[in-house]
Each structure stands twice: as C-alpha cells, then as structure tokens.
Image (cartoon, rainbow, N blue to C red):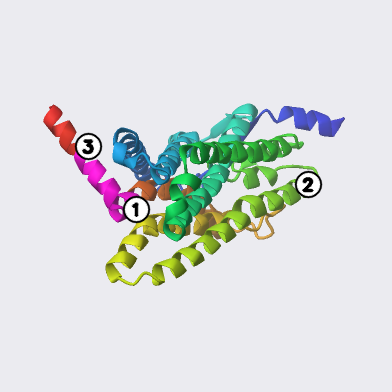
Amino acid sequence: MVSANQTASVIEFVLLGFSAYPNLEKTFFVLILLMYVAILLGNGVLILVTVSNSHLHTPMYFFLGNLSFLDICYTTSSVPLILDSFLTPRKTICFSACAVQMFLSFAMGATECVLLSLMAFDRYVAICNPLRYPVVMSKAAYVPMAAGSWVAGSTASMVQTSLAMRLPFCGDNIINHFTCEILAVLKLACADISVNVISMGVTNVIFLGVPVLFISFSYVFIIATILRIPSAEGKKKAFSTCSAHLTVVIVFYGTILFMYGKPKSKDPLGEDKEDLADKLISLFYGVVTPMLNPIIYSLRNKDVKAAVRNLVFQKRFAF
C-alpha cells in the first residue's frame, strides 16, 4: 500500500538540467536560441527549395525534405522546454507532458535512422545501377519508403514510451536532464527495468545497428563503383552526389551511437563530470546536428546551392 501511494503521488517530474551550473545557463540560453532560429531558417529554406524547384523533384531531395522537416519537429519537441528551463530555477513537467515529449524525441530519432539508410540506398542505386534508377526509385516506391520510416520510428517510440511510463516511480521525481530523456527517466523507476533494457537493446540493434551496416555496405559498393570510373571528373561528380549525405551520417550516427549504444539500468558512477558530459553530448545531438544538416547540404551540393540562389534572387526581384 505504501508503494502504491508513493507511485500515485508522482504526478510531475522536476528537470534538473544545468541548474548545478548556473554560470552556464545564460550562455547556453543565448547559444541554443540562436541555433534554434538557425535550424528553423536553414531547414525551412531546404524544404521550400525542394518543394518549389522542379529540378529537385527527385527521390534524393524528397528524402532531404523529409529530413529537414524531421529536424524541425525534433528540435521543436525539446528546445522550447530546454530554453524555458534556463529561465526558471525549478522547472517541472507533468507526467503526461513528459510522456509526449519522450515519444516525440524518440520517434524523430528513430525515424531519422531509417531515413538516412533510405538515402544511402537511393545513392547506391543512382551510382551503382543508374539504368534501373528510374524504375527502382519511382514515385510509387520512394513515397511509401519515406512514409514507412515515419511509421517505423513512431511505432518503436510508442513501445519504448509505453514501457517506460508504465513503471512505478516511488518518490524521487528529479530527472537529471533538461528533457524527458528516456534513459534519465528509467533511472527513477523503483521496479525492475530489465524488460526496458532488453527492449532498448533490441531497438538499438534494429534502428542503429542494422542501418549502420546497411549504409556501410552501400558505401562500400558506391566507392568501388566510383573508383572504376575512368575519368577524374566523373569520379568527382559521382562522389559529390553522396558526400553531403555521408558527412551527415558520420555526424549523426557518431553522436547517437555514443549516447544510446550501451543502455544502462543504473548509473554506477554518478559523477558530476560524467553527468555534464552526457548532457552536453545530448545537447549536441539534439541541437547542433539538426543545425549542421542544411549547412552541409548547402555547401556540398551544387543543386541545392543553385536552388537557394535562385530563390533569393526571386525574392529580391519580387520586392
């Protein structure tokens, strides 16, 4: 009876965030606000040019538009909460809002894993089997592929969120994070979380391990095909079509694998430095990576650069 009463009393969580480092909060508030604005503008422009420019109505740029929209959704699900936590000394979030935020963040991350692997497949077909590209990557194929990535990510998130939020939380409601990050929430549970750990491990294999292997094998074949191209100009042109995607993959998976590769049921160290490092890594994944994506594609893709220039010129002449 005591345990049940304690569980029922936990109706909200306290987000610790960077409250232990008050000198950093104002600096982080300004930096994150500026990066959030850059995310909205950069990814918004990418979506606009991929929709408005008929030359970009191809599978690769359709996936890119989905990626930009996903980055906007992901950051919007967490950044306003992070910014608000910097302005209030004690930030609380109700149980249901925490579940929603956890679901959105996990769903967007899992969807991006699948989406990046689909973009690798698109580049593999375009470079290794160019004659079959119009058939394999027809609109009837790439639209359901993109939709499937959203469904898969949302389904995985629903499972993980449901398993996490059904756990009993006995008294301790302080989340040592700036959002309802699933691993930080699991540490507060007063019951056995072995099922959650196993489920998270399986999800990691499906949404991290499998896509990484798929992307790796795709680029092995892509690089082997590029090396067989006789002219240096042909090699440069072929590689330029996938260099931006490869850069985004390295940044994204490098960060997320470090974060979620080894799920823990308890924190054995509990050191302040480790906590700060984990939060900074999570912040990098949640804010810096979505900000870099449009920059990388704008700088390393001549089609996108040309489309952005045309859009700017059209706006200038319109005024």
| Discs 1, 2 touching: Cβ within 8 Å | no
Residue displayed at 56% across by 41% down = 149
Q: CA distance from mark 1 to mark 3?
A: 18 Å
Residue 192 placement (x, y as % from top left): 80, 46
* Residue beneath disc 3: 311
Residue 99: percent from left, percent from top: 63, 32
Above or below, 224 against 212 in this view is below
Of tags 2 and 3, the one toward the viewer is: 3
Q: Which residues are magenta?
A: 295-310
Q: Secondary structure at mark 2?
A: helix
Instruction: Kindly state the secondary structure of the residue where label 1 is placed.
Output: helix
* Residue 230: quadrant of the picture: bottom left
Q: Residues within 10 Å of mark 2 (few under 14, many from 20)?
A: few
- Is 15 left or right of 22, judged from the image as shown? right
Q: Nearer the viewer, residue 205 or 224?
A: 224
**Is 201 part of what is drawn in magenta?**
no
233 or 317: which is nearer to us?
233
Q: Residue at x 59, y 28 (%)?
A: 97
Which residue is located at x 33 percent, y 41 percent?
56
Residue type for callout 2: Val
x%, y% of residue 250?
A: 46, 59
Q: Quadrant of residue 57?
A: top left
| Quadrant for the C terminus in the image | top left
Task: Say whether disc 1 or disc 3 marks the residue closer to the N-terminus.
Answer: 1
Marks 1 and 2 sit apart, C-alpha to C-alpha, by 39 Å
Q: Is residue 298 magenta?
A: yes
Mark number for residue 296? 1
Q: Is residue 136 above or below residue 300?
A: above
